[in-house]
Amino acid sequence: MRLAGPAKADSPLIVIFGAAIQPDGDPSPAFLRRIAFGLAAAGQHPDAPILCSGGARRPGPTEASVMFDHLFTAGVARDRLLRDDTSLTTLENINAATQQVRRDGHSEVVICSDSYHLPRIHLGLAFLGVRNARGPVPRGRGGASWIHWIAMCLRESVAVPFYLLILIGSQLRIRP
């Protein structure tokens, strides 16, 4: 199955936000969910490029390269796939997506991540003036275990206000 290509600049930019790669090199369950969300978005937006975003936190492949391989193997055209191999945080993923949107003139970002992660991503993109929409991400746990879901929701309850402070601080430093 070949899922279209080449990408059109006026189409949305699908962005898959990375997650942990296990020590043996396999994607974590959260990572596999996000790749599946990206694949579903690729089918919904057949002209949209897909930014695979995520660096490597330990020796081995980057999150972006693992996403790229999974999507290509699933039939997504190589010319639709873009890689951000350097981002190590959600904020760096957001910055990479923003740069890609501004460089190529995409209409919006289609966010592919776990639902607990979406508010922080939406906040960052919106703060930077980038239109964005929820990708084909199920509401609720979306396949995550209850323990993982609760832990990640608690993390996000701290991360969202922290990111807001970082974003406001960065804007204050930029202004004359």
Image (tube, grey):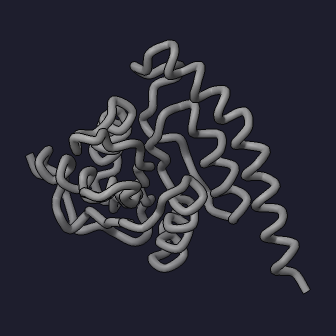
> 48 left or right of 13?
left
* Above or below, comparing residue 137 to residue 85 in the picture: above
Image quadrant in which you'd find residue 160:
top right
Q: Quadrant of the N terminus?
A: top left
* Above or below, comparing residue 110 to residue 128 in the picture: above
- Return the residue nearer the eye: 69 or 55: 55
- Residue 69's spot in the image, x, y percent? 18, 53
- Residue 63's spot in the image, x, y percent? 33, 53
Image quadrant in which you'd find residue 142:
top left
Q: Quadrant of the C terminus?
A: bottom right
- Residue 52's spot in the image, x, y percent? 35, 57
- Return the residue nearer the eye: 127 or 57: 57
> 104 left or right of 94?
left
Q: Residue furthest left?
A: 1
> 121 left or right of 24?
right
- Return the residue nearer the eye: 77 or 22: 22
Q: Residue furthest right?
A: 176
Residue that appears at 20% across and 68% down? 79
Q: Residue furthest top?
A: 146
* Above or below, comparing residue 151 to residue 132 in the picture: above
> 83 left or right of 24?
right
Residue that appears at 78% across and 52% down? 164
Residue that appears at 46% across and 40% down? 113
- Residue 133's spot in the image, x, y percent? 55, 46
Q: In the rendered picture of this protein, how many numbered marks are placed on residues?
A: 0
- Return the residue nearer the eye: 144 or 142: 144
Q: Residue furthest bottom?
A: 176
